[in-house]
Amino acid sequence: MTTIMAVLIAGPTASGKSQLALTLAERLGGAVVNADSMQVYRDLRVLTARPGVADEARAPHHVYGTLDAAEPASVARWLGDAATAIEAARHAGRVPIVVGGTGLYLAALTEGLSPMPRIPDAVRRHWRQAQAHEPPQVLHAILAERDPAAAARLRPTDPQRIVRALEVVEATGRSLSAWQAERTPPVLPRGPGVAAYVLAPPRDLLRERIAQRFEAMMEAGAVEEAVGLTARRLDPALPAMKAIGVAQLSAYAMGLVGRGEAVADAVTRTRQYAKRQDTWFRNRFADWERLAPGDVPTF
């Protein structure tokens, strides 16, 4: 019988990841490590459905609420925090259970991280202006000339990633593909003893759960949380300010839209995000075991 050294749990938002992680933490004597890019923010406990105080008392939880909303989260920063938390769990004799919906975080953890260069502001402004004024197909054609390998991997309708690749090749003289080839060793490589799961609830059930959970958030103080964050007048480009619900509920609090419209907009955006997550996991983590709602692995 293989000894379980770590558990990885991925899945779309509202799929039940946190509850499964807590259940396994109690069964295995484990510690839960967050892999969600929004649950790292202290300012967003309600709107990101972070585990509550009662859950945190049942098992150790790490890398939750570690950043202020004024700080931009990044894959590299999270990876360092997660590595520290995993080592601490093991030192305490606990099984690290890494759970979250941010696929890039989990991929970096298990496959390694590609070092990315700093892009000068002038280069970034140039390509962001080009993105605003040029069709993505035009930018994709430029990329095909400068970095054919990156262009071959990217859809002509994906302007953000196209512009990112153009920024890198202009700023460094090296293709994005070359940078991505220089991966660091993975912190938690897949192999014997590392169990990996993707929660895959039926789409209709997930849509219902998302709506029910947002109503629960409203009862738990989501409006107050959104208003408090908006009142800080932080840069709207910061990741925390883009969390689903912040703009919608702030507009509701200011009387710009009704409650029903604000909730419906936030629920729709959450459902769209969940669909993107599900597609990403199906493509990138195709070899991870799929779990239906209520399934709990036995070891």
Image: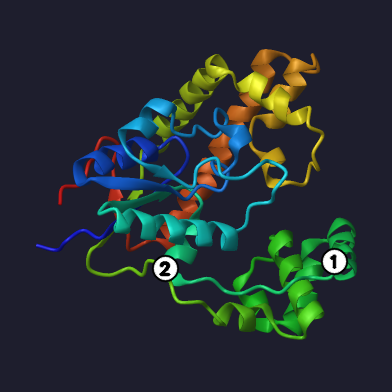
Q: Can residue 104 be seen in this view?
A: no
Report if the CB atoms under discs 2 and 1 are less than 8 Å apart.
Answer: no
Q: Residues within 10 Å of mark 1 (few under 14, many from 20)?
A: many
The residue under label 2 is 187
Callout 1: SS: helix
- What's the residue at 72%, 23% (across, down)? 227
Tell me the number on the disc at residue 127: 1
- When asked about the image quadrant of residue 26, the answer is top left
Nearer-the-camera pick, 99 or 161: 99
- What's the residue at 56%, 44% (across, down)? 66
Q: Is residue 123 visible?
A: yes
Q: Position of residue 259 (x, y in %)?
A: 67, 14
Q: What residue type is labelled 2?
A: Val
Count of residue discs: 2
Q: What residue type is labelled 1?
A: Trp
Q: Where is residue 254 in the image (x, y as percent from the top left)?
A: 80, 17
- What's the residue at 37%, 66% (across, down)? 188
Furthest residue in direction front, as rendered: 92
Q: Which colour scheme appears in the figure?
A: rainbow
Query: Which label lies toward us, 2 or 1?
Result: 2
Furthest residue in direction left, as rendered: 1
Q: Position of residue 215 (x, y in %)?
A: 52, 18
| First-in-chain label (2 vs 1) | 1
Nearer-the-camera pick, 6 or 84: 84
Callout 2: SS: loop
- When asked about the image quadrant of residue 125, the answer is bottom right
